[in-house]
Structures are given as structure tokens and as C-alpha cells.
Image (spheres, rainbow, N blue to C red):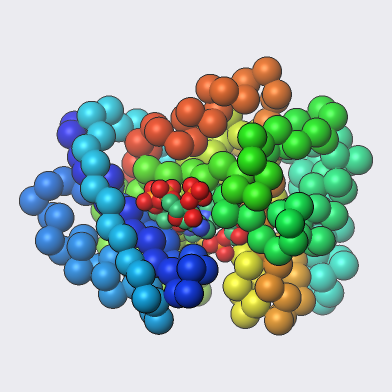
Amino acid sequence: MSLLSVRMRASLGGKHVSGAERLTEEEFLPRVLCELLRRPGEHDFLKITIDRVEEVIETEPLKVSSFNFGSVEEARRFAVSKLVEAGVPKEVALKGLRLLAQGANPKGGNMRGAVLMDIRSGERLENDPERGVRTVRMDWKGRDRVRKFLLERGFTERTLDALAVATKNVLCGVLAELCWSDDPDYTTGYVASPKTGYVRIHPLKERGDELGGRIYFIESERLEEVVKCLERRAVLLRGLPSS
Ligand code: COA
Ligand code: AMP
């Protein structure tokens, strides 16, 4: 199947403010473009990139579960326990958590992508620790139906996109992921792995906190192939998410 990868990014005053992407058949391109142009909010720069992907892998979404806690402290403790269940040594899980909490960009603030962390030693593996690595070229088959399904069950559009990111990551060899948003108003984060599925955890940060990020725990021997897959391989999620 030949599909188009359509990617939108927008910035304001040089700061990235919005990104979204789709995998689409060519006949639906006008509709997809309209949809992506509706997304960015206030911006002074917008770019859409389109390229053709020849090979697409289909996979099922990770199973979803949700947990609510009375404090960030409890929620973070639970996140560490889920990372340990996924196979991350406790010390490495704590290192990842501390890194996200303090801001993983060595120059301060957020990164432009995810941290790659060796699952055994906790060593950082990204070439550029201000940038990290980004998961791109993924989408849902029948996106509208899945979106409706999730919204009817009290989930958000963010869950739709983040579940696609997390599912592709697992397919590419990420053994566990820890994420919370850099949006100061969005405090739900997640741990994802083949063993635990996609575990939504609330609240992984305090409201008003502008720090966020992602840590991908991987085997350092597989660094090259994992990054290549995250950046290049096209992945379509099929079916509805289940719990
Ligand atoms: N955060 C910050 N800056 C970003 C960015 C992001 N997510 N994505 C792109 N940029 C900026 C960077 O400056 C980047 O330069 P760099 O490679 O040196 O970091 C520049 O834009 C060009 O990036 P590129 O990778 O060429 O963009 P692209 O056209 O392939 O588009 C996006 C990538 C924007 C689609 C992708 O990054 C994205 O955000 N996808 C949406 C993922 C999603 O749904 N996330 C929601 C999870 S809740
Ligand atoms: P978000 O969930 O969009 O708020 O993003 C939270 C953090 O995840 C950002 O600050 C980035 O560090 C990182 N990030 C954003 N997009 C991607 C992506 N496509 N792949 C990997 N990491 C990302």
C-alpha cells in the first residue's frame, strides 16, 4: 500500500507550538490538509511536509488502563513501579523520572524530542541531548471512528495521538516509555511497555508546570536500528483500543 505522510508544524516567535501528522491515501489529501490547518492555534510560521511511504506496517494499539492519585508524589511512585514491572531497574527508572522532573534539556527547559536511555545503565544515548529523537510517521486506520470511540469514553484527542506514539515505540523496540506533557494545563502522563500496555497516570505533574518530556528505555546495542525505525518506518494502528 502506498500512502502519503503529511506532517504539520507551527511556531510562534521561533518556538514550536503545534505538530500533527497523518498517513493518508492520496485521494483524501485535501481533507487531511484542511484538518491539519485547523489545528495549530496562534502561530507566525507553519510548514506542511508531504512525502510518500511505500511500506506500511499495521499493528494493534497497546491496551489502555487509567489510574488516578491524590498527589503527584503518589502518582510518580506508581509510575516507577510500572517501569519496574516493565523491566526497568528501579535506579534507572528513578533516574528517568528525576530527569523529566528537572527538565531533560541540558540547556534548560524541554527537549524537542525524547531522551533515549540505556535500560541497564541509565546512560543517555541521544546524539543531541537538546533535540533527542522523535517518533514520526504513524497514524490510525479509520482515525475518525477511533477518535469518536475514545472521546465518547472520556478520553481526549491527546490520548489518540499519544497512544499512536507509544504503540509505534514498542513496535520499534522501545522497552518502556515514561511521558508527561509540557503543556502546563495537562497533567496526565503515562508509562507504556509491551508488558504493562499504555498506563495513563494522573497527575504526573503539578498544574502550571511547563516541564515535560519523554524517556525511551532501550538496549544500547540496538540504538541505531531503534532510532531508524522511530524516524523512518510508517506504522498504522488498526482496530479500537481496549482495556
Ligand atoms: N517539538 C519541538 N520542535 C519541533 C517538534 C516538536 N515536537 N517537531 C518539529 N520541531 C521543530 C524543530 O526545530 C525541528 O528541528 P530539529 O530536527 O533540529 O529538532 C524542526 O521543527 C523540523 O522538524 P522535522 O522533524 O523536520 O519536522 P516534520 O516536518 O517531520 O514534522 C512533527 C514532525 C511536527 C509532525 C512531529 O514532531 C510531531 O510533533 N508530531 C505530532 C506527534 C504527536 O501527535 N504528539 C502528540 C503526543 S500527545
Ligand atoms: P507533548 O506530549 O506533545 O506535550 O510532548 C511532550 C514532550 O515529548 C515534548 O516536550 C518533547 O520533548 C517530546 N516529544 C514531542 N513530540 C514528540 C515525538 N513525536 N516523538 C518523541 N518525543 C516527542
Q: Can residue 33 be seen from the camera position used here?
A: yes
For this rendering, which residue is in front, 151 or 167?
167
In the image, is 36 to the left or to the right of 41?
A: left
Q: Which residue lies furthest to the top in this view?
A: 221
Q: In this view, does 167 lie above or below 147?
A: above
In the image, is 88 to the left or to the right of 39?
A: right
**Which residue is depicted at the point 47% across and 30% down?**
229
Q: In this view, does 139 lie above or below 2?
A: below
Q: Position of residue 196 (x, y in %)?
A: 67, 43
Q: Can residue 17 be seen from the camera position used here?
A: no
- How many discs appear? 0
**Rendering quarter of residue 126:** top right
In the image, is 212 to the left or to the right of 69?
A: left
In the image, is 57 to the left or to the right of 167?
A: left
For this rendering, which residue is in front, 30 or 56?
30
Q: Position of residue 42 (x, y in %)?
A: 40, 81
**Which residue is depicted at the point 39% across and 32% down?**
233
Q: Quadrant of the N terminus?
A: top left
**Which residue is depicted at the point 49% across and 44% down?**
135
Q: Position of residue 237 (x, y in %)?
A: 38, 44
**Rendering quarter of residue 43:** bottom left
Q: Is residue 7 above or below residue 38?
A: above
Q: Residue furthest left?
A: 27
Q: Residue furthest right?
A: 91
